[in-house]
Image: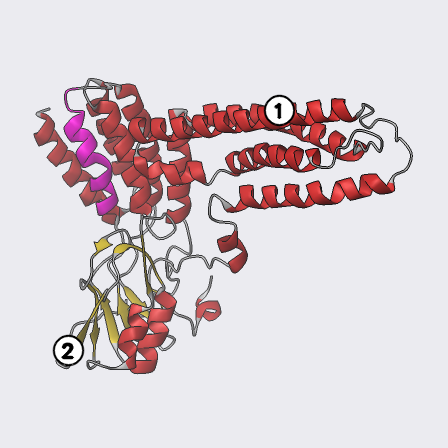
């Protein structure tokens, strides 16, 4: 993107602004785990009430539909209801076991991806809806002098069973694939790389120097979390810059995405504002706190998950250095991507080029330290791990940008001393 195309916008000199992707009401609606299964069950209830009425309007027997009598229909529907509720319990139990296995073998921070699986949600929804649909239709089956057998409804119940069998196979395949360590670490690495590759790399105009900022004398106000607490999940940088521009202030962040902030802890310092100014609440509203870390603005979270997997693999109870080497392979991929890009500038400027927000972005050095320090510590007695780390650093030293070479060299020296090699 050229300067002319970006003129008049909020920007960094190096790197993208980094605003989180906007999540619309439709995505938020379908986000929770229970929404899709509940919707499928609600549709089954509606179908169970409507289809028997359609059956009553059909005076002739239709081909290819259920052709048994009332007792046969009751027996089939009862069997479907009892079988499906049992299989639903089995699927739910399998899901819980897989979540526990993923938590203990990999890291508890992976559970969100398992619960977000649409295959798991649809499988539970169809299984439960088959049970509900069969029970509702069973109410309308009548024998005696005026028998009534809802042929279409019973046939639909049977088709739901067939769909449940197909989904059960898909569910088992999904579960067995999703807990393979290679699939887990590859998925995390892909998400991390996508986060690192968002936006432009460098500002094309080199005629002017990079913007800088130094604190001047004047009033300052601290912005805290107030009564809120949790993990900093997102920062709306564009809103921060526009808010600071309107108020004529500079916002200096004192935390970064992924850090935990408790009640009353500092989020930012507003230079040039007074206590009670409207800008204080507006700045506080640009920070989003949540219960757990998320990936979109936090590539360190992806690295953290991979390092956790490697540490568990290197623990005496598991002793699986090969998995740790697989993790190092993916970390190598991530570090190559990060090392090929310049570190993001901490200064965000407004349309006129005035610094309005001073950030503390993730740097290549931070990612490098996070990736290797702990794995090198726990894997120093392994034959595979130190060799793989040395090979990783050898490659990085010749592939990263010039400004990152010093960090790689320093890391090599530190690891050399720690490993005694």
Which stretch is magenta?
366-381
User: With respect to residue 140, does 183 lie above or below?
Assistant: above
x and y, in percent, of residue 275 in the image: 19, 80
| Viewer-nearest of discs 1 and 2 | 1
Crowd rating for badge 2 (residues with CA inside 10 Å; few <14, some 14–19, many 20+): few
Q: Which residue has dot 2 on it?
A: 216
User: With respect to residue 132, does 23 lie above or below?
Assistant: below
Q: Quadrant of residue 21?
A: bottom left
* Disc number placed over residue 320 in the picture, else none: none
Our reading of the magenta stretch's main secondary structure is helix
Task: Please name whichever residue, 132 or 102, is drawn nearer the observer in this view of the structure.
Answer: 132
Cα–Cα span, label 1 and label 2: 69 Å
Q: Is residue 388 visible?
A: no
Please tell me which residue is depicted at 31% across the width and 23% down the height of the picture.
Answer: 323
Q: Secondary structure at mark 2?
A: loop
Q: Quadrant of residue 393?
A: top left
Q: Secondary structure at mark 1?
A: helix
Task: Please name whichever residue, 158 or 274, is drawn nearer the observer in this view of the structure.
Answer: 158
- Marked residue nearer the N-terminal end (1 or 2): 1
Report the residue that reaches farthest toward the front.
Answer: 145
* Disc number placed over residue 165 in the picture, else none: 1
Q: Is residue 370 magenta?
A: yes
x and y, in percent, of residue 156 in the image: 73, 33
Left or right of residue 330, residue 253 in this image: left
Left or right of residue 388, residue 351 in this image: right
Q: Is residue 235 magenta?
A: no
């Amino acid at each position: 993107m050229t300067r002319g195309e970006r003129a008049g916008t909020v920007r960094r000199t190096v790197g993208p602004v980094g605003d989180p992707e906007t999540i619309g009401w439709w995505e938020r609606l379908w986000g929770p785990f229970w929404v899709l299964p509940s919707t499928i069950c609600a549709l089954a209830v509606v179908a169970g009430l409507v289809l028997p009425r359609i059956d009553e309007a059909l005076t002739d027997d239709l081909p290819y539909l259920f052709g048994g009598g009332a007792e046969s229909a009751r027996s089939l529907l009862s069997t479907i209801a009892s079988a499906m509720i049992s299989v639903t319990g089995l699927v739910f139990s399998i899901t819980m076991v897989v979540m526990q296995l993923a938590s203990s073998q990999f890291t508890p921070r992976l559970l969100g991806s398992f619960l977000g699986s649409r295959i798991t949600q649809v499988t539970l929804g169809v299984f439960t809806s088959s049970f509900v649909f069969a029970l509702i239709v069973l109410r309308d089956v009548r024998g005696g002098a005026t028998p009534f057998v809802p042929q279409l409804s019973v046939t639909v119940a049977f088709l739901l069973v067939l769909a449940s069998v197909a989904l059960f196979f898909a569910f088992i395949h999904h579960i067995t694939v999703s807990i393979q360590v290679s699939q887990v670490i590859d998925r995390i690495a892909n998400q991390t790389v996508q986060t690192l590759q968002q936006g432009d790399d460098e500002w094309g105009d080199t005629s002017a120097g990079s913007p800088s900022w130094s604190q001047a004398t004047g009033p300052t106000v601290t912005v805290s979390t107030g009564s809120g607490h949790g993990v900093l999940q997102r920062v709306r940088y564009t809103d921060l810059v526009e808010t600071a521009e309107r108020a004529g202030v500079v916002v200096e962040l004192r935390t970064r995405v992924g850090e935990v902030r408790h009640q009353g802890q500092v989020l930012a310092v507003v230079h040039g504002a007074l206590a009670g100014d409207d800008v204080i609440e507006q700045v506080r509203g640009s920070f989003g706190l949540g219960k757990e870390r998320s990936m979109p603005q936090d590539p360190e979270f992806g690295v953290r998950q991979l390092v956790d997997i490697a540490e568990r693999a290197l623990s005496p109870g598991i002793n699986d250095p090969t998995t740790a080497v697989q993790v190092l392979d993916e970390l190598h991929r991530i570090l190559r991507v990060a090392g090929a890009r310049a570190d993001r500038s901490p200064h965000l400027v407004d349309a006129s080029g005035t610094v309005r927000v001073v950030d503390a972005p993730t740097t290549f050095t931070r990612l490098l330290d996070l990736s290797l320090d702990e794995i090198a510590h726990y894997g120093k007695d392994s034959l595979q791990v130190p060799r793989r780390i040395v090979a990783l650093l050898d490659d990085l030293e010749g592939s990263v940008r010039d400004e990152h070479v010093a960090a790689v060299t320093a890391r090599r020296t530190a690891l050399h001393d720690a490993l005694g090699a």
